Amino acid sequence: MQSMAPTSPSLPVAGPVPRRRLQRVRAAAVSDEPKLNKYSARITEPKSQGASQAVLYGVGLTDADLRKPQVGVSSVWYEGNTCNMHLLRLAEAVRDGVREAGMVGFRFNTVGVSDAISMGTRGMCYSLQSRDLIADSIETVMGAQHYDANISIPGCDKNMPGTIMAMGRLNRPSIMIYGGTIKPGHFQGNSYDIVSAFQCYGEYVSGSITDEQRKNVLRNSCPGAGACGGMYTANTMASAIETLGMSLPYSSSTPAEDPLKLEECRLAGKYLLELLKMDLKPKDIITEKSLRNAMVIVMALGGSTNAVLHLIAIARSVGLHLTLDDFQKVSDQVPFLADLKPSGKYVMEDLHKIGGTPAVIHYLLEQGLLDGDCMTVTAKTLAENAKIFPPLSEGQQIIRPLDNPIKPTGHIQILYGNLAPEGSVAKITGKEGLYFSGPALVFEGEESMITAISENPANFKGKVVVIRGEGPKGGPGMPEMLTPTSAIMGAGLGKNSEDAQFWFLLLSEIVEFSKRREICTFLNTIQRIRFSLPTPFIFALSGAS
Protein backbone atom coordinates (compact mmCIF):
# COMPACT_ATOMS: atom_id res chain seq x y z
CA MET A 1 0.00 0.00 0.00
CA GLN A 2 1.63 3.19 -1.17
CA SER A 3 1.82 5.97 1.41
CA MET A 4 0.92 9.50 0.49
CA ALA A 5 1.05 10.97 3.96
CA PRO A 6 2.98 14.24 3.76
CA THR A 7 6.48 14.45 5.19
CA SER A 8 5.66 17.99 6.26
CA PRO A 9 2.25 19.57 6.82
CA SER A 10 2.06 21.71 3.69
CA LEU A 11 -0.84 23.62 5.13
CA PRO A 12 -2.40 26.58 3.35
CA VAL A 13 -0.17 29.62 3.69
CA ALA A 14 -1.10 31.87 6.60
CA GLY A 15 -0.65 35.36 5.22
CA PRO A 16 -2.48 38.50 4.17
CA VAL A 17 -6.12 37.85 3.40
CA PRO A 18 -7.64 39.37 0.23
CA ARG A 19 -10.25 42.06 0.77
CA ARG A 20 -12.82 40.01 -1.17
CA ARG A 21 -12.61 37.25 1.43
CA LEU A 22 -13.14 39.68 4.26
CA GLN A 23 -16.29 40.83 2.49
CA ARG A 24 -17.49 37.23 2.18
CA VAL A 25 -17.09 36.65 5.89
CA ARG A 26 -18.40 40.01 7.07
CA ALA A 27 -21.03 42.15 5.39
CA ALA A 28 -19.94 45.17 7.40
CA ALA A 29 -16.82 47.10 6.47
CA VAL A 30 -13.69 45.96 8.28
CA SER A 31 -10.91 48.34 9.23
CA ASP A 32 -7.56 47.87 7.47
CA GLU A 33 -6.04 47.76 10.94
CA PRO A 34 -8.53 45.92 13.16
CA LYS A 35 -8.01 46.02 16.90
CA LEU A 36 -6.67 42.54 17.63
CA ASN A 37 -6.66 42.91 21.41
CA LYS A 38 -10.19 44.24 21.79
CA TYR A 39 -11.01 41.92 24.72
CA SER A 40 -7.71 42.04 26.61
CA ALA A 41 -7.55 45.82 26.14
CA ARG A 42 -10.35 46.04 28.72
CA ILE A 43 -7.78 45.14 31.40
CA THR A 44 -4.49 46.27 29.82
CA GLU A 45 -5.38 49.85 28.78
CA PRO A 46 -7.53 51.63 31.41
CA LYS A 47 -5.57 53.33 34.17
CA SER A 48 -8.32 52.17 36.51
CA GLN A 49 -7.26 48.54 35.93
CA GLY A 50 -3.97 48.92 37.76
CA ALA A 51 -4.33 45.66 39.69
CA SER A 52 -4.93 43.74 36.46
CA GLN A 53 -1.83 45.25 34.91
CA ALA A 54 0.26 44.64 38.02
CA VAL A 55 -0.55 40.93 37.87
CA LEU A 56 0.36 40.80 34.18
CA TYR A 57 3.68 42.51 34.87
CA GLY A 58 4.13 39.98 37.65
CA VAL A 59 3.81 37.01 35.27
CA GLY A 60 6.48 38.50 33.02
CA LEU A 61 4.73 40.73 30.49
CA THR A 62 6.37 43.93 29.25
CA ASP A 63 4.80 47.22 28.19
CA ALA A 64 4.96 46.00 24.59
CA ASP A 65 3.29 42.72 25.55
CA LEU A 66 0.34 44.56 27.08
CA ARG A 67 -0.48 45.93 23.63
CA LYS A 68 -0.53 42.49 22.01
CA PRO A 69 -3.53 40.17 21.65
CA GLN A 70 -3.70 37.56 24.39
CA VAL A 71 -4.41 33.92 23.54
CA GLY A 72 -5.71 31.35 26.00
CA VAL A 73 -4.09 27.96 25.29
CA SER A 74 -6.33 25.40 26.97
CA SER A 75 -5.36 21.75 27.20
CA VAL A 76 -7.21 18.82 28.71
CA TRP A 77 -3.97 17.51 30.20
CA TYR A 78 -3.60 14.98 32.97
CA GLU A 79 -1.12 12.16 33.44
CA GLY A 80 -3.46 9.25 34.11
CA ASN A 81 -4.69 8.59 30.57
CA THR A 82 -2.87 7.73 27.34
CA CYS A 83 -5.22 10.06 25.43
CA ASN A 84 -4.17 13.08 27.49
CA MET A 85 -0.76 12.46 29.04
CA HIS A 86 1.16 14.29 26.27
CA LEU A 87 -1.06 17.35 25.91
CA LEU A 88 0.97 19.60 28.21
CA ARG A 89 3.92 19.20 25.84
CA LEU A 90 1.68 20.05 22.88
CA ALA A 91 0.32 23.08 24.73
CA GLU A 92 3.87 24.32 25.27
CA ALA A 93 4.53 24.09 21.53
CA VAL A 94 1.29 25.96 20.83
CA ARG A 95 2.22 28.72 23.29
CA ASP A 96 5.65 29.08 21.71
CA GLY A 97 4.07 29.35 18.26
CA VAL A 98 1.64 31.98 19.50
CA ARG A 99 4.54 34.04 20.82
CA GLU A 100 6.47 33.64 17.57
CA ALA A 101 3.41 35.03 15.76
CA GLY A 102 3.66 38.21 17.85
CA MET A 103 0.98 37.50 20.44
CA VAL A 104 0.93 36.61 24.12
CA GLY A 105 0.06 33.02 24.98
CA PHE A 106 -1.08 31.78 28.38
CA ARG A 107 -1.62 28.09 29.07
CA PHE A 108 -4.39 26.87 31.32
CA ASN A 109 -5.94 23.51 32.00
CA THR A 110 -9.29 21.81 32.42
CA VAL A 111 -10.35 18.44 33.76
CA GLY A 112 -11.11 15.29 31.82
CA VAL A 113 -12.38 11.73 32.24
CA SER A 114 -10.76 8.62 30.80
CA ASP A 115 -13.62 6.62 29.33
CA ALA A 116 -11.38 3.56 29.03
CA ILE A 117 -10.57 3.63 32.75
CA SER A 118 -14.09 4.46 33.94
CA MET A 119 -15.98 2.18 31.52
CA GLY A 120 -17.90 -0.58 33.27
CA THR A 121 -17.90 1.28 36.60
CA ARG A 122 -19.88 4.03 38.28
CA GLY A 123 -17.06 6.34 37.23
CA MET A 124 -18.61 6.38 33.76
CA CYS A 125 -21.48 8.44 35.18
CA TYR A 126 -19.06 11.39 35.19
CA SER A 127 -18.04 11.06 31.54
CA LEU A 128 -20.74 12.90 29.60
CA GLN A 129 -20.93 15.61 32.25
CA SER A 130 -17.20 16.19 31.79
CA ARG A 131 -17.96 17.47 28.28
CA ASP A 132 -20.02 20.32 29.70
CA LEU A 133 -17.57 20.85 32.56
CA ILE A 134 -14.77 21.28 30.01
CA ALA A 135 -16.90 23.76 28.05
CA ASP A 136 -17.75 25.67 31.22
CA SER A 137 -14.12 25.71 32.38
CA ILE A 138 -12.74 27.08 29.11
CA GLU A 139 -15.52 29.64 28.78
CA THR A 140 -14.93 30.72 32.40
CA VAL A 141 -11.19 31.27 32.07
CA MET A 142 -11.43 32.88 28.64
CA GLY A 143 -14.17 35.25 29.77
CA ALA A 144 -12.71 36.13 33.16
CA GLN A 145 -9.17 36.63 31.85
CA HIS A 146 -10.34 38.62 28.80
CA TYR A 147 -8.36 36.53 26.32
CA ASP A 148 -8.81 37.60 22.71
CA ALA A 149 -8.63 34.14 21.14
CA ASN A 150 -8.37 30.48 22.04
CA ILE A 151 -6.48 27.38 20.98
CA SER A 152 -7.72 24.23 22.69
CA ILE A 153 -5.96 20.86 22.79
CA PRO A 154 -8.29 17.97 23.67
CA GLY A 155 -7.43 14.28 23.75
CA CYS A 156 -10.16 11.87 24.92
CA ASP A 157 -13.74 11.35 23.78
CA LYS A 158 -15.75 14.09 25.51
CA ASN A 159 -12.86 16.57 25.29
CA MET A 160 -13.40 17.50 21.64
CA PRO A 161 -17.06 18.56 21.76
CA GLY A 162 -16.43 20.26 25.12
CA THR A 163 -13.78 22.54 23.64
CA ILE A 164 -15.87 23.37 20.55
CA MET A 165 -18.93 24.15 22.67
CA ALA A 166 -16.87 26.67 24.64
CA MET A 167 -15.60 28.23 21.42
CA GLY A 168 -19.14 28.51 20.09
CA ARG A 169 -20.45 30.20 23.20
CA LEU A 170 -17.54 32.66 23.42
CA ASN A 171 -17.43 33.29 19.67
CA ARG A 172 -13.85 34.56 19.65
CA PRO A 173 -11.29 33.44 17.03
CA SER A 174 -10.44 29.86 17.93
CA ILE A 175 -8.70 26.70 16.69
CA MET A 176 -8.90 23.15 18.04
CA ILE A 177 -5.81 20.92 17.85
CA TYR A 178 -6.58 17.24 18.35
CA GLY A 179 -4.06 15.47 20.59
CA GLY A 180 -3.86 12.69 18.04
CA THR A 181 -4.48 8.97 17.76
CA ILE A 182 -2.49 6.19 19.41
CA LYS A 183 -0.49 3.67 17.42
CA PRO A 184 -1.71 0.06 17.42
CA GLY A 185 -0.04 -2.38 19.78
CA HIS A 186 1.65 -5.55 18.56
CA PHE A 187 2.43 -8.90 20.21
CA GLN A 188 3.38 -12.22 18.63
CA GLY A 189 2.23 -11.10 15.19
CA ASN A 190 -1.15 -9.78 16.36
CA SER A 191 -2.32 -6.16 16.33
CA TYR A 192 -4.25 -4.77 19.30
CA ASP A 193 -6.11 -1.65 20.36
CA ILE A 194 -8.29 -0.60 23.28
CA VAL A 195 -11.31 -2.59 22.08
CA SER A 196 -9.10 -5.68 22.04
CA ALA A 197 -8.71 -5.05 25.76
CA PHE A 198 -12.47 -4.74 26.22
CA GLN A 199 -13.32 -7.80 24.15
CA CYS A 200 -10.72 -10.14 25.62
CA TYR A 201 -12.86 -10.50 28.75
CA GLY A 202 -15.67 -12.02 26.70
CA GLU A 203 -13.14 -14.29 25.00
CA TYR A 204 -11.85 -15.35 28.41
CA VAL A 205 -15.25 -16.12 30.00
CA SER A 206 -16.29 -18.08 26.90
CA GLY A 207 -13.11 -20.17 27.13
CA SER A 208 -11.63 -18.93 23.85
CA ILE A 209 -8.40 -17.69 25.47
CA THR A 210 -6.46 -18.36 28.67
CA ASP A 211 -5.94 -15.84 31.45
CA GLU A 212 -2.30 -15.39 30.41
CA GLN A 213 -3.37 -14.66 26.82
CA ARG A 214 -5.87 -12.14 28.19
CA LYS A 215 -3.12 -10.40 30.16
CA ASN A 216 -0.88 -10.25 27.08
CA VAL A 217 -3.66 -8.45 25.20
CA LEU A 218 -3.95 -5.91 28.02
CA ARG A 219 -0.19 -5.33 28.22
CA ASN A 220 0.04 -4.58 24.49
CA SER A 221 -3.17 -2.70 23.64
CA CYS A 222 -1.93 0.83 24.51
CA PRO A 223 1.73 1.24 23.43
CA GLY A 224 2.02 5.00 24.04
CA ALA A 225 0.30 8.37 23.93
CA GLY A 226 -2.82 9.05 21.91
CA ALA A 227 -6.55 8.44 21.75
CA CYS A 228 -8.10 5.06 20.98
CA GLY A 229 -6.99 4.05 17.50
CA GLY A 230 -10.15 2.99 15.67
CA MET A 231 -13.06 5.09 14.49
CA TYR A 232 -14.32 5.39 18.05
CA THR A 233 -15.61 8.59 19.65
CA ALA A 234 -12.32 10.50 19.81
CA ASN A 235 -11.30 9.97 16.18
CA THR A 236 -14.91 10.38 15.06
CA MET A 237 -15.25 13.78 16.69
CA ALA A 238 -11.78 14.90 15.59
CA SER A 239 -12.64 14.02 11.97
CA ALA A 240 -16.03 15.70 12.23
CA ILE A 241 -14.50 18.87 13.69
CA GLU A 242 -11.80 19.03 11.01
CA THR A 243 -14.52 18.73 8.35
CA LEU A 244 -16.59 21.27 10.27
CA GLY A 245 -13.69 23.67 9.72
CA MET A 246 -12.58 24.22 13.31
CA SER A 247 -9.20 22.47 13.17
CA LEU A 248 -6.29 22.57 10.75
CA PRO A 249 -5.98 19.98 7.96
CA TYR A 250 -4.48 16.66 9.13
CA SER A 251 -5.23 17.46 12.77
CA SER A 252 -7.61 14.51 13.14
CA SER A 253 -5.45 11.88 11.43
CA THR A 254 -1.88 12.78 12.47
CA PRO A 255 -0.84 10.34 15.24
CA ALA A 256 -0.08 11.74 18.69
CA GLU A 257 3.60 10.78 18.64
CA ASP A 258 4.28 11.80 15.03
CA PRO A 259 6.64 14.83 14.77
CA LEU A 260 4.04 16.45 12.51
CA LYS A 261 1.75 16.84 15.51
CA LEU A 262 4.25 19.14 17.22
CA GLU A 263 4.72 21.05 13.97
CA GLU A 264 0.96 21.54 13.72
CA CYS A 265 1.03 22.99 17.24
CA ARG A 266 3.82 25.41 16.38
CA LEU A 267 2.03 26.59 13.22
CA ALA A 268 -1.34 27.18 14.87
CA GLY A 269 -0.42 30.66 16.14
CA LYS A 270 0.11 31.98 12.61
CA TYR A 271 -3.33 30.80 11.54
CA LEU A 272 -4.94 32.22 14.66
CA LEU A 273 -3.39 35.62 13.95
CA GLU A 274 -5.08 35.66 10.54
CA LEU A 275 -8.40 34.75 12.15
CA LEU A 276 -7.98 37.72 14.48
CA LYS A 277 -7.18 40.03 11.57
CA MET A 278 -10.26 38.81 9.71
CA ASP A 279 -12.39 38.73 12.85
CA LEU A 280 -13.36 35.24 11.69
CA LYS A 281 -15.09 33.55 14.59
CA PRO A 282 -16.66 30.13 15.32
CA LYS A 283 -20.17 31.27 14.40
CA ASP A 284 -18.83 32.22 10.95
CA ILE A 285 -17.46 28.69 10.53
CA ILE A 286 -20.03 26.52 12.34
CA THR A 287 -23.10 26.87 10.14
CA GLU A 288 -25.94 24.63 9.03
CA LYS A 289 -23.91 23.69 5.95
CA SER A 290 -20.70 22.94 7.82
CA LEU A 291 -22.62 20.88 10.39
CA ARG A 292 -24.00 18.83 7.53
CA ASN A 293 -20.42 18.37 6.29
CA ALA A 294 -19.52 17.03 9.73
CA MET A 295 -22.42 14.58 9.60
CA VAL A 296 -21.36 13.45 6.12
CA ILE A 297 -17.87 12.45 7.19
CA VAL A 298 -19.23 10.67 10.26
CA MET A 299 -21.37 8.53 7.94
CA ALA A 300 -18.61 7.93 5.40
CA LEU A 301 -16.07 6.89 8.05
CA GLY A 302 -18.49 4.75 10.08
CA GLY A 303 -18.11 7.01 13.10
CA SER A 304 -19.43 6.65 16.62
CA THR A 305 -23.09 7.17 17.47
CA ASN A 306 -21.82 9.62 20.09
CA ALA A 307 -21.42 12.07 17.21
CA VAL A 308 -25.19 12.49 17.26
CA LEU A 309 -25.45 13.91 20.77
CA HIS A 310 -22.19 15.86 20.49
CA LEU A 311 -23.00 17.56 17.18
CA ILE A 312 -26.46 18.46 18.49
CA ALA A 313 -24.78 20.09 21.51
CA ILE A 314 -22.24 21.90 19.31
CA ALA A 315 -25.05 23.23 17.12
CA ARG A 316 -26.88 24.50 20.18
CA SER A 317 -23.75 26.31 21.39
CA VAL A 318 -23.86 28.54 18.29
CA GLY A 319 -27.63 28.97 18.30
CA LEU A 320 -28.46 26.36 15.65
CA HIS A 321 -30.98 23.53 15.86
CA LEU A 322 -29.98 20.00 14.86
CA THR A 323 -32.34 17.03 15.20
CA LEU A 324 -32.25 13.24 14.99
CA ASP A 325 -34.08 13.46 11.68
CA ASP A 326 -31.27 15.60 10.23
CA PHE A 327 -28.90 12.68 10.83
CA GLN A 328 -31.30 10.28 9.14
CA LYS A 329 -31.51 12.52 6.06
CA VAL A 330 -27.71 12.55 5.75
CA SER A 331 -27.51 8.81 6.42
CA ASP A 332 -29.95 8.15 3.57
CA GLN A 333 -27.67 10.07 1.17
CA VAL A 334 -24.14 9.09 2.26
CA PRO A 335 -22.69 5.56 1.99
CA PHE A 336 -20.50 3.91 4.62
CA LEU A 337 -17.05 3.72 2.99
CA ALA A 338 -14.31 3.20 5.60
CA ASP A 339 -12.94 -0.21 6.60
CA LEU A 340 -11.98 1.05 10.05
CA LYS A 341 -12.33 -0.50 13.49
CA PRO A 342 -14.54 -1.29 15.36
CA SER A 343 -16.51 -2.82 12.48
CA GLY A 344 -13.55 -3.01 10.09
CA LYS A 345 -9.88 -3.87 9.88
CA TYR A 346 -7.81 -0.67 10.00
CA VAL A 347 -7.04 2.12 12.50
CA MET A 348 -6.56 5.87 12.18
CA GLU A 349 -2.78 5.60 11.77
CA ASP A 350 -3.42 3.51 8.64
CA LEU A 351 -5.70 6.23 7.28
CA HIS A 352 -2.96 8.79 7.94
CA LYS A 353 -0.55 6.75 5.80
CA ILE A 354 -2.83 6.92 2.74
CA GLY A 355 -3.47 10.66 2.90
CA GLY A 356 -5.37 11.22 6.13
CA THR A 357 -8.63 13.04 6.66
CA PRO A 358 -7.83 15.74 4.02
CA ALA A 359 -7.65 13.01 1.36
CA VAL A 360 -11.05 11.68 2.45
CA ILE A 361 -12.46 15.21 2.33
CA HIS A 362 -10.90 15.61 -1.12
CA TYR A 363 -12.69 12.45 -2.31
CA LEU A 364 -16.05 13.37 -0.79
CA LEU A 365 -15.85 16.82 -2.39
CA GLU A 366 -15.15 15.22 -5.77
CA GLN A 367 -18.26 13.07 -5.30
CA GLY A 368 -20.41 16.08 -4.46
CA LEU A 369 -21.14 14.94 -0.91
CA LEU A 370 -19.59 17.93 0.89
CA ASP A 371 -20.19 21.68 0.58
CA GLY A 372 -16.81 23.10 -0.37
CA ASP A 373 -17.79 26.74 0.18
CA CYS A 374 -17.73 26.47 3.98
CA MET A 375 -15.05 28.54 5.71
CA THR A 376 -12.36 26.96 7.89
CA VAL A 377 -9.74 28.08 10.42
CA THR A 378 -7.14 28.26 7.62
CA ALA A 379 -9.05 31.36 6.45
CA LYS A 380 -9.79 29.40 3.29
CA THR A 381 -12.77 27.31 2.30
CA LEU A 382 -12.93 23.55 2.60
CA ALA A 383 -12.59 23.23 -1.18
CA GLU A 384 -9.60 25.59 -1.30
CA ASN A 385 -7.87 23.53 1.38
CA ALA A 386 -8.58 20.30 -0.49
CA LYS A 387 -6.93 21.56 -3.68
CA ILE A 388 -3.60 21.78 -1.86
CA PHE A 389 -3.52 18.20 -0.61
CA PRO A 390 -3.02 14.93 -2.50
CA PRO A 391 -5.91 12.51 -3.02
CA LEU A 392 -6.15 9.08 -1.46
CA SER A 393 -3.16 6.86 -2.16
CA GLU A 394 -3.53 4.79 -5.31
CA GLY A 395 -4.42 1.18 -4.54
CA GLN A 396 -5.39 1.87 -0.93
CA GLN A 397 -7.92 -0.52 0.60
CA ILE A 398 -9.27 1.53 3.52
CA ILE A 399 -11.72 3.92 1.83
CA ARG A 400 -14.04 2.14 -0.58
CA PRO A 401 -15.15 3.81 -3.83
CA LEU A 402 -18.66 5.16 -3.99
CA ASP A 403 -19.71 2.40 -6.40
CA ASN A 404 -18.53 -0.34 -4.02
CA PRO A 405 -19.34 0.85 -0.49
CA ILE A 406 -19.39 -1.23 2.65
CA LYS A 407 -23.02 -0.15 2.95
CA PRO A 408 -24.91 1.93 0.36
CA THR A 409 -26.36 4.21 3.05
CA GLY A 410 -25.05 5.47 6.36
CA HIS A 411 -24.53 3.19 9.35
CA ILE A 412 -26.35 5.51 11.75
CA GLN A 413 -30.08 4.90 11.67
CA ILE A 414 -32.82 6.65 13.64
CA LEU A 415 -35.45 4.17 14.80
CA TYR A 416 -38.93 4.90 16.16
CA GLY A 417 -41.48 2.65 17.79
CA ASN A 418 -43.27 1.87 21.03
CA LEU A 419 -39.90 1.40 22.75
CA ALA A 420 -38.61 4.73 21.39
CA PRO A 421 -41.55 6.99 20.56
CA GLU A 422 -39.32 10.04 20.15
CA GLY A 423 -36.49 8.25 18.40
CA SER A 424 -33.38 6.22 19.13
CA VAL A 425 -29.95 5.98 17.55
CA ALA A 426 -28.77 2.68 16.10
CA LYS A 427 -25.43 1.74 14.57
CA ILE A 428 -26.06 -0.62 11.65
CA THR A 429 -22.83 -1.35 9.80
CA GLY A 430 -24.28 -3.58 7.09
CA LYS A 431 -23.47 -6.96 8.61
CA GLU A 432 -26.69 -7.29 10.59
CA GLY A 433 -29.25 -7.68 7.82
CA LEU A 434 -32.42 -5.64 7.54
CA TYR A 435 -34.61 -7.38 10.08
CA PHE A 436 -34.16 -8.99 13.46
CA SER A 437 -36.53 -10.32 16.07
CA GLY A 438 -35.46 -11.99 19.27
CA PRO A 439 -36.40 -12.70 22.88
CA ALA A 440 -35.59 -9.91 25.29
CA LEU A 441 -33.11 -10.25 28.15
CA VAL A 442 -33.79 -7.37 30.52
CA PHE A 443 -31.23 -6.41 33.18
CA GLU A 444 -31.34 -3.86 35.97
CA GLY A 445 -28.06 -2.05 35.41
CA GLU A 446 -24.78 -2.84 33.70
CA GLU A 447 -23.28 -4.88 36.53
CA SER A 448 -26.08 -7.46 36.52
CA MET A 449 -25.62 -8.00 32.79
CA ILE A 450 -21.86 -8.52 33.19
CA THR A 451 -22.47 -11.01 35.99
CA ALA A 452 -24.96 -12.91 33.84
CA ILE A 453 -22.69 -13.21 30.80
CA SER A 454 -19.80 -14.28 33.03
CA GLU A 455 -21.89 -17.11 34.45
CA ASN A 456 -23.64 -18.29 31.28
CA PRO A 457 -22.65 -16.64 27.97
CA ALA A 458 -24.62 -19.23 25.98
CA ASN A 459 -27.86 -17.86 27.42
CA PHE A 460 -27.35 -14.68 25.39
CA LYS A 461 -27.43 -16.44 22.04
CA GLY A 462 -30.08 -14.99 19.74
CA LYS A 463 -31.35 -12.56 22.38
CA VAL A 464 -31.83 -8.79 22.50
CA VAL A 465 -30.14 -7.34 25.58
CA VAL A 466 -31.90 -4.49 27.37
CA ILE A 467 -30.06 -2.70 30.19
CA ARG A 468 -32.33 -0.49 32.26
CA GLY A 469 -31.39 2.44 34.44
CA GLU A 470 -28.35 3.62 32.48
CA GLY A 471 -29.72 6.67 30.67
CA PRO A 472 -29.19 10.39 31.27
CA LYS A 473 -31.44 10.30 34.34
CA GLY A 474 -31.07 6.70 35.48
CA GLY A 475 -27.28 6.36 35.27
CA PRO A 476 -27.22 9.17 35.91
CA GLY A 477 -25.24 10.71 33.11
CA MET A 478 -25.89 8.24 30.28
CA PRO A 479 -22.81 6.03 30.88
CA GLU A 480 -21.71 4.19 27.75
CA MET A 481 -22.24 0.44 27.61
CA LEU A 482 -19.00 -0.56 25.87
CA THR A 483 -18.11 -3.12 28.53
CA PRO A 484 -21.33 -5.15 28.04
CA THR A 485 -21.27 -4.88 24.25
CA SER A 486 -17.58 -5.82 24.11
CA ALA A 487 -18.23 -8.80 26.38
CA ILE A 488 -20.94 -9.97 23.97
CA MET A 489 -18.67 -9.58 20.95
CA GLY A 490 -15.70 -11.12 22.73
CA ALA A 491 -17.78 -14.14 23.66
CA GLY A 492 -18.42 -14.73 19.95
CA LEU A 493 -22.12 -13.90 20.15
CA GLY A 494 -22.16 -11.33 17.37
CA LYS A 495 -20.44 -13.07 14.49
CA ASN A 496 -22.71 -15.73 13.02
CA SER A 497 -26.14 -15.76 11.48
CA GLU A 498 -27.19 -18.55 13.83
CA ASP A 499 -26.54 -16.13 16.67
CA ALA A 500 -29.20 -13.91 15.07
CA GLN A 501 -26.45 -11.30 14.70
CA PHE A 502 -25.62 -8.64 17.23
CA TRP A 503 -27.19 -5.23 16.96
CA PHE A 504 -25.51 -2.47 18.88
CA LEU A 505 -28.21 0.00 19.78
CA LEU A 506 -27.80 3.27 21.62
CA LEU A 507 -31.04 4.56 23.10
CA SER A 508 -30.63 8.24 23.84
CA GLU A 509 -32.96 10.64 25.68
CA ILE A 510 -35.88 9.20 23.79
CA VAL A 511 -39.05 10.02 25.70
CA GLU A 512 -40.34 13.10 27.40
CA PHE A 513 -40.53 13.00 31.19
CA SER A 514 -44.29 12.34 31.31
CA LYS A 515 -43.81 9.10 29.38
CA ARG A 516 -40.61 7.92 31.04
CA ARG A 517 -42.25 5.98 33.86
CA GLU A 518 -44.68 4.41 31.41
CA ILE A 519 -41.81 3.20 29.21
CA CYS A 520 -39.81 1.88 32.18
CA THR A 521 -42.84 -0.08 33.41
CA PHE A 522 -43.33 -1.45 29.90
CA LEU A 523 -39.71 -2.66 29.84
CA ASN A 524 -40.49 -4.95 32.78
CA THR A 525 -43.09 -6.83 30.71
CA ILE A 526 -41.47 -7.15 27.28
CA GLN A 527 -40.78 -10.61 25.93
CA ARG A 528 -39.59 -9.92 22.41
CA ILE A 529 -38.08 -7.02 20.45
CA ARG A 530 -38.16 -6.44 16.70
CA PHE A 531 -35.88 -4.20 14.64
CA SER A 532 -36.55 -3.41 11.01
CA LEU A 533 -34.75 -1.56 8.20
CA PRO A 534 -35.11 0.22 5.83
CA THR A 535 -38.52 0.94 7.39
CA PRO A 536 -36.92 2.04 10.64
CA PHE A 537 -38.69 0.82 13.74
CA ILE A 538 -37.93 -0.73 17.10
CA PHE A 539 -40.96 -2.52 18.46
CA ALA A 540 -41.36 -4.43 21.71
CA LEU A 541 -43.96 -7.12 22.38
CA SER A 542 -45.16 -7.74 25.92
CA GLY A 543 -47.16 -10.45 27.64
CA ALA A 544 -49.08 -12.58 25.17
CA SER A 545 -48.64 -10.09 22.30
Image (cartoon, grey):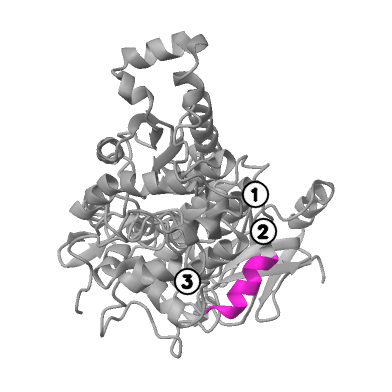
The magenta segment is: 325-334
Residue underneath mark 2: 322
Q: Position of residue 460 (x, y in %)?
A: 54, 65
Residue underneath mark 3: 494
Q: Nearer the viewer, mark 2 or mark 3?
A: 2
Instruction: Give the secondary structure at mark 2.
Output: loop
Q: Position of residue 92 (x, y in %)?
A: 26, 35
Report the amino acid beneath label 2: Leu
Residue drawn at (47%, 70%) of the image: 302
Residue drawn at (44%, 75%) of the image: 495
Q: Residue furthest bottom?
A: 403
| Quadrant that contains the N terminus | bottom left
Residue underneath mark 1: 316
| Quadrant that contains the C terminus | bottom right
Magenta-drawn stretch, dominant element (helix, strand or loop): helix
Residue drawn at (60%, 54%) of the image: 309
- Reply yes or no: does residue 330 show up in magenta: yes
Mark toward the start of the polypeptide (1 vs 2)? 1
Instruction: Give the secondary structure at mark 1.
Output: helix
Report the amino acid beneath label 3: Gly
Mark 1 crowdedness (10 Å alpha carbons): few <14, some 14-19, many ≥20? some
Q: Are marks 1 and 2 in contact (CB under 8 Å)?
A: yes
Q: Position of residue 397 (x, y in %)?
A: 30, 81
Q: Nearer the viewer, residue 96 or 456?
A: 96
* Relative horizontal placement of residue 538, taking residue 304 as reference (left or right): right
Report the amino acid beneath label 1: Arg
